[in-house]
Image (cartoon, rainbow, N blue to C red):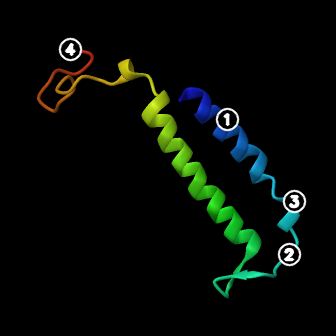
């Protein structure tokens, strides 16, 4: 899955360079949104989905702090 996420990130980087709709106002999406802005909104939503996939499948499992280790009632790092 890590390779898939890397490929999706590279695809987003390439697709983000939207020179083909840079100066176009028409067609309007939903009757009011310029096509370039709608394309950028879709790229942003796709980036959020890819980031969620990266966190879910590529994030190291051992970097999380154990529950209860740093609570309000526990000692500060200087007292340890």
**What is the CA distance from the residue labelled 3 to the residue labelled 2?**
10 Å
Give the residue at mark 3. Answer: 19
Mark 2 or 1 closer to N-term? Answer: 1
Q: Along the line of sight, which residue is nearer the eye, 28 or 3?
A: 3
Residue mark closest to the camera, 3 vs 4:
3
Mark 3 or 1 closer to N-term? Answer: 1
Horizontal side of 6 relative to 59 (left or right) equals right
Residue located 27% across and 18% down the image: 77
Give the residue at mark 1. Answer: 7
Q: Along the line of sight, which residue is nearer the eye, 70 or 50?
A: 50
Residue mark closest to the camera, 2 vs 4:
2
The reply to whether discs 3 and 2 touch (Cβ–Cβ < 8 Å) is no
Mark 3 or 2 closer to N-term? Answer: 3
Give the residue at mark 4. Answer: 79
**What is the CA distance from the residue labelled 2 to the residue labelled 4?**
62 Å
Q: Residue furthest top?
A: 80
**What is the CA distance from the residue labelled 1 to the residue labelled 4?**
46 Å
Q: Which secondary structure, mark 1?
A: helix
Give the residue at mark 2. Answer: 24
Residue located 17% across and 20% down the image: 75
Horizontal side of 34 relative to 77 (left or right) equals right
Residue mark closest to the camera, 2 vs 1:
1
Residue located 16% across and 26% down the image: 68
Horizontal side of 37 relative to 57 (left or right) equals right
**What is the CA distance from the residue labelled 3 to the residue labelled 1?**
21 Å
Indicate the quadrant containing the C terminus: top left, top right, bottom left or bottom right: top left
């Amino acid at each position: 899955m890590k390779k898939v996420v890397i490929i999706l990130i590279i695809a987003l980087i390439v697709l983000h360079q939207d020179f083909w709709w840079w100066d176009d106002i028409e067609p309007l999406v939903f009757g009011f949104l310029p096509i370039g802005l709608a394309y950028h909104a879709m790229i942003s939503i796709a980036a959020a989905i890819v980031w969620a996939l990266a966190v879910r499948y590529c994030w190291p499992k051992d970097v999380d702090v154990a529950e209860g280790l740093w609570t309000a009632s526990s000692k500060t790092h200087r007292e340890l």
